[in-house]
Image (tube, grey):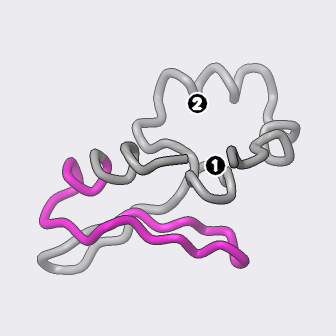
Amino acid sequence: MKPDRSRYLKYLTKEDKELLKKECSIKPCPFCGRLFPQLLESDETCWISCIDAECEADGPVKSNVESAEYFWNRREE
């Protein structure tokens, strides 16, 4: 089942939507559809996490930002 992202997109302006398409390298959460998941980093690891309090999905822990983004963006929706 594909998440309903419309509840988040309706608050964005047309300009924000265009910017999101062009600039954001991290895709929305594949489970709840929340836009702008956060990148979390420690000294040696990093991962992407959904900021929705009811979802809190985490991507796999990786050694660099590029890997964390790559694996988050390729998760099934």
Marks 2 and 1, the one that precedes in the sequence: 2
Q: Secondary structure at mark 2?
A: helix
Quarter of the image holding residue 65? bottom left
Q: How busy is the neighbourhood of tag 2: few (under 14 within 10 Å), some, or many (20 plus)?
A: some
Q: Do the numbered discs 2 and 1 sit on residues whose CB atoms are within 8 Å? A: yes
Residue 4 lies left or right of residue 71; in this view the side is right
Locate residue 73 relative to residue 70 in the image: left or right: right
Instruction: Tell me which residue sits at (63%, 49%) in the image.
Output: 35
Q: Disc 2 versus disc 1: distance between alpha carbons?
A: 9 Å
Residue at 44%, 44% in the rendered image: 26
Query: Three-letter amino acid code at disc 1?
Result: Leu
**Residue that badge 2 annotates:** 20
What count of labels does the image hold? Answer: 2
Residue 43 falls inside the magenta stretch: no
Where residue 41 appears, as percent x and y from the top left, is 29, 72
**Residue 73 tag number:** none
Q: Where residue 4 appears, x then y in whole percent?
A: 78, 46
- The residue range painted magenta reads 48-69
Horizontal and vertical percent position of residue 77: 55, 47
What SS does tag 1 mark?
A: loop
In the image, 13: left or right of 46?
right
- For the point 18% across and 73% down, the residue is 45
Q: Which residue is mark 1?
A: 35
Tell me if mark 1 has few (under 14), some (14-19) or many (20+) residues whose alpha carbon lies within 10 angstroms of its own.
some
